[in-house]
Image (cartoon, helix red, strand yellow):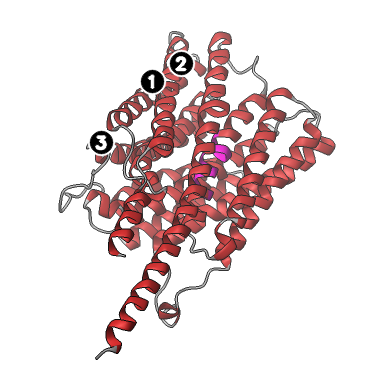
Amino acid sequence: MATVPLFEPLASSAHIGESAAVITRERVKSLMLRAWILVGLFFMALPGTLLGFSNLMAISAHHGLGALPAAWMEGHGHAQVFGWIGSFILGIGFYSQPAHGRSVVRLPSSSFVLWESGVAMRWVANIYGWHWRTLYPVSAGFELVAVILFLYAASHHKLPASTQGNRAKSPMELWMVSVLIGTAGLASAVIFNFVECVRLAFEGGLRSFPHSLDQKYLVVLGWGIFVPVVWGFSARWLPAFLAITKPNVRLFRAALCLDVAGVLFGVAGSPRSGTILFAISAATIGFALRFWERPHGAAKTQGIHPSFPVFVRLSYAWLIVAGSMSVWAAFADVHGGIWGASRHALTVGFAATMVFAIGPRILPHFAGIERIFSKRLMLLSLLCLQSGCLLRVSSEPLAYEGLVSFAWKLLPASGMLELAGVLIFATNLALTFLIGRSAFATNKANQRAAA
């Protein structure tokens, strides 16, 4: 009997030590995620949105794209897609991977330095043209290596011993398939970008992609990366957050197949066939995710603004608008206005709205912080973004296609609203990460109490 109390403290101490190691590892991963998100916010707000607003002002003043260098448009797009969304994808991806020992920091930090350096160099080369023949391939090479490191880290994780025996019996969940398709799209875009940057460095007379090639590249970026990644995370998180039934597997699989087929048609130079498939997939995914069914409970909006479910559903309405307008553009666009509105509905209306809505729900939690800094700022950022996007998507075809001349005056207003929304969102998240209450402090207090 005397041996029992002798061994109990030892077991308890070992358990506490193991828990402390787990918390330390999670804290390191959370700090690394904060770095990815904060730098992503920087590229979103300044090189991305602010440059996009400047471009929009120039386009509105000259009533067209003629006076604006194509490299500036590509610089804006690269900062938004790679600097913002790419940083978020890689940061969340590394955070989601189980890691031990030095791999907790070594691979994510190496990928972080390469990725963000590559995006920054590309922005400098696009905007200022400084040694662009050198910076283009170097920056694209950095981004390619960063993605390779991410894929290497993802491929070397082992399932727990308890689940390895069931691996062959249980197929991969569909949300994971969707995210992997988006990751494959990201890898394809990075390779595409590297090859073209090397070609431009040696053969190109201008520091921008040829127009026809750029159109195919944009298909991969939008429908090959944004769409499947957002669908995958929606299928993973939204049933719990919105109190809705899990996705319809058959319809979700059909929507994914339609989207992938549309991307292949677009890259092959058949935009009409591709856009029709995109429009059908956009309508199908709403039914697959059961957005139009009655929730079976109250949505989980703890720590965020209660309007969260409305904006999540609104983002998928924007996806339908984007798919429908892409069909219109493929058959009737002359001056690029309908194409531009369609892409804006996809990137801002769909992808950015989803990030603005679900980001305050999950990013503080991932980063080890209890809640978003301000619920009101969350709502204000979403309202500004929606107002600006609605104004932009409705006025851009009218202005570019020469239907209503007054629409040129509305474009700067749309840009100011979206810029305000982006800056508010970035400020809210930055303040959350910088001064928000850490959840690890509570865990440490509980450990000391248990000890």
Name the residue at the right extreme: 202
Label 2 residue SS: helix
Label 1 belongs to which residue? 391
- The amino acid type found where label 3 is placed reads His
- SS at mark 1? helix
Asked whether the beta carbons under mark 3 and mark 1 sit within 8 Å of each other, the answer is no
SS at badge 3? loop
Q: Identify the magenta region.
A: 80-90
Specify the quadrant of the image occupied by residue 184. bottom right
In the rendered image, which quarter contains the N terminus? bottom left
Say which residue label 2 marks: 411
The crowd level at tag 1 (other Cα within 10 Å; few <14, some 14-19, many 20+) is: many
Was residue 84 drawn as part of the magenta stretch in this picture? yes
Q: Is residue 251 above or below residue 41?
A: below
Residue 65 appears in the rendering: yes
Image point (52%, 43%), residue name: 35
The disc at residue 119 is none
Quadrant of the rendered structure where residue 199 is? Answer: top right
**Which numbered dot is residue 305?**
3
- Choose mark 3 or mark 1, whichever is in front: 3
x and y percentages locating residue 111 in the rendered image: 62, 50
Q: Position of residue 38 (x, y in %)?
A: 50, 37
Q: Which class describes the residues within 10 Å of circle 3: few (<14), some (14-19), or many (20+)?
A: some
